[in-house]
Amino acid sequence: MRTPLRFRRPALTARDRRTVVAAATGAAALCVVAQIALYAGSAPATGGGPVVDLVLNLLVGLSLLLVAGFPRTAGTLTILVTAVFAAGTSLAPGLFASEGQLSPVATPLAAPLVVSFLVYLLPWRQAFAFAAVLALLAIPLWAPTWTALYFALSATALPALVALYLKARFELVRSLRERAELADTERRLLAERAETAERQRLAAEMHDIVTHHVTEIVLHADALRVTAHDDEVRVAAEQIRRAGARTLTELRDLMRVVTNGIEATPAARPDHDNGGDLAALAAVDGAALEIVGDPGTVPAVVARTVYRVVQESLTNARKHAPGVPVAIALAYPGNRAEVEVRNAPPRHEGDPVLASAGSGMGLIAQP
């Protein structure tokens, strides 16, 4: 079973097509100007060439404007004009082609350019088929000469070979560029993967260390709560135990996201979650809390952000101004939130170990 011949055009990018259109337009303009100049230059010596010669050459030259979209149409038109020239040269010299033409073969001036564009735009077998037909029509088979063969091949086969070489070289350079870009992308992805793996390893180690120490704190606080006789000590121990347990829970949820990329489930953090109890958070440090407006008017993400801002502010006050009063003012005008945390001047120097225990990151301010 024979496979039918499929006339498939090589896929061109939008940039390649624009380049072909621009080159074809420039070549068409150049051929038209050159043909008119040759016709006008031959007028004083020969009285002007045949008008049909000028019209046919201009027709082939203008067909370059269509070669980007209809290459086979431009090639067929060039073959027909060449056939007319060949017939006129043998049957009626001087009727279709000028007797003082530049070469002994009857080919349109734009034929080499048409062949070059056909080689670039069509599969090589089809392009060379057009070039072979043009060469056979250009050679006077009834009176072949080496000179005619040379000019015919120069006008058809030579442009085809040069265009084929340039096309192959261009495709090779583009393939090498794409391979280099692909290799660079692969190296970047591998580097990002290695960086992610290292971050996960460090996060796991940090989780193990922090979990170990916080667990010790929770256990000692629970033991102190059970054995202490002073009510204030038991209350303080209970607060430490709850804070440690809450820290372990948040650390576990955070590690799930960092190591596995798993987001918190809706059950663990529902839409109405506000990130934590602000009243309980303020009571731990004895801070005064004032709320104006309805906290339920803001989205859950804003409520959680408010909780984190207050939490970080109290942490900074505890580090750098221990024991001084802290006032927290929250306002909810509409669907936004305003947070103001103030503390009195510190009475004494804070603990240098505690003050330097932060990561230096704090809260990320965004405009």
Image (spheres, grey):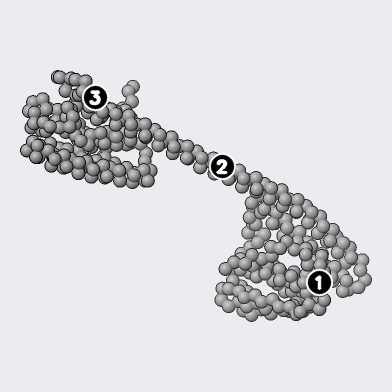
Which of disc 1 and disc 2 is earlier in sequence?
2
* Nearer the observer, 222 or 190: 190
Quadrant that contains the N terminus: top left
* Nearer the observer, 206 or 217: 206
- How many other residues sit within 10 Å of disc 1, few (<14), some (14-19) or many (≥20)? some
Task: Establish if 12 lies above or below 248.
Answer: above
- SS assignment at label 1: loop
Task: Establish if 82 lies above or below 32.
Answer: above
Q: Amino acid at mark 2?
A: Glu
- How many other residues sit within 10 Å of disc 3, few (<14), some (14-19) or many (≥20)? few
Count the marks: how many? 3
Q: Is residue 115 visible?
A: yes
Which of disc 3 and disc 1 is earlier in sequence?
3
The residue lying at 76 percent from left, 59 percent from top is: 248
List x then y, in percent, for residue 260. Answer: 66, 49
Q: Which residue is mark 1?
A: 350
The residue lying at 84 percent from left, 61 percent from top is: 217
List x then y, in percent, for residue 311. Answer: 71, 69
Q: Which residue is mark 2?
A: 186
Q: Amino acid at mark 3?
A: Tyr
- SS assignment at label 3: helix
* Nearer the observer, 17 or 138: 138
Residue contact between numbered discs 2 and 3, judged by CB atoms under 8 Å: no
**Could you say which quadrant of the image residue 30 lies in?**
top left
* Nearer the observer, 11 or 62: 62
- How many other residues sit within 10 Å of disc 2, few (<14), some (14-19) or many (≥20)? few
Which of disc 3 and disc 2 is earlier in sequence?
3
Q: Which residue is mark 3?
A: 150
